[in-house]
Amino acid sequence: MSDNPNPVAELHDAVALRVNPAEASTRPEGTLGVELRLMTRYVVRRLRLSHTTSVLEIGCGTGIFSEPIAKTGASYVGVDFAQRPTEVLRERAAMSPVGERIEVHCLDPLGQPQAMDGLGKFDRVLVYAALHYVRSEAEGRELVQLVVDKLRPGGRALIGSLPLKELRWELEPQARSVAARARLLMRGEREPVPTPPLWRLGCALVVTAKRLFSRWNGGAARPPSLPAGYAIPLSRPMIEGWLPDKVRYHWRRSAVGAPLSFGRADLLITRDD
């Protein structure tokens, strides 16, 4: 994530000026506005914000979470190494009624450690739909460590929309003993929740509606893609191995939103020290 030019930065630069906010933020083809609204409300809820909360988003892009976060009274700092998306976010913040609570920096979170240090510590750190861009386990570990390092004691981080290669297996209901459940809780982890039938039906209806809308609308513009094999596939054990001992964590299923997918989960981290 530190080479220049960077395929990830080029991908986001290529779409940042599109009028459709879903396309500008590299959401999947056919993503609806209602999905973006659902996603932003969902993320804000999980962050548990107040007017005294400070939030850092690493990989903010065009900042689709910035205004919803700032509207809660929280202060927001967005960081991204792609230039055009941060320019778009600055322009939007300048026109926003809560723009004074939005701060934007174009810098490489891993490649410019002194600049990141200068931002200080935060009550919340958000990394949404970005961890899957890491090219190696070493880079993934470095990014997760950065998230933890930027948290104040008692702070909370959300690393969201993670495409885990074994997620379907992990989210199936598992028969566990009382002792096994106790071990999960002692590690700060909670057992995955099985998918309710009505949730699956609702997702199926939304997916069908999206396909029909996309055909009727002539299809949405496809964002550029990364080179094949650019990033490593993520797994739950791999990501858990990147976490330092000083944190508690638990997994949650990604809510219906953009991107709408059955194969994504969120990792919530709490720093104790």
Image: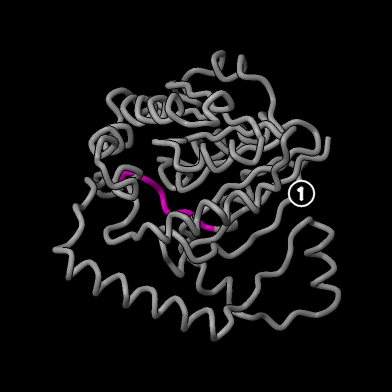
Image: 198 above or below 21: below
Q: Amino acid at mark 1?
A: Arg
Q: Residues within 10 Å of mark 1 (few under 14, many from 20)?
A: some
Image: 25 above or below 184: above
Q: State which quadrant residue 180 falls in.
A: bottom right
Image: 152 above or below 24: above
- What predominant SS class does the magenta segment belong to? loop
Q: State which quadrant residue 51 falls in.
A: top right
Query: Which quadrant of the rendered structure holds the N terminus?
Result: top left
Segment tinted magenta in the rendering: 230-235
Left or right for 173, reference 8: right
Q: Residue at x 49, y 66 (%)?
A: 256
Residue identifier under label 1: 248
Q: Residue at x 48, y 24 (%)?
A: 104
Q: Residue at x 20, y 52 (%)?
A: 222
Q: Position of residue 173 (x, y in %)?
A: 64, 81
Left or right for 30, reference 2: left
Q: Position of residue 50 (x, y in %)?
A: 73, 40
Which residue is most to the bottom? 197
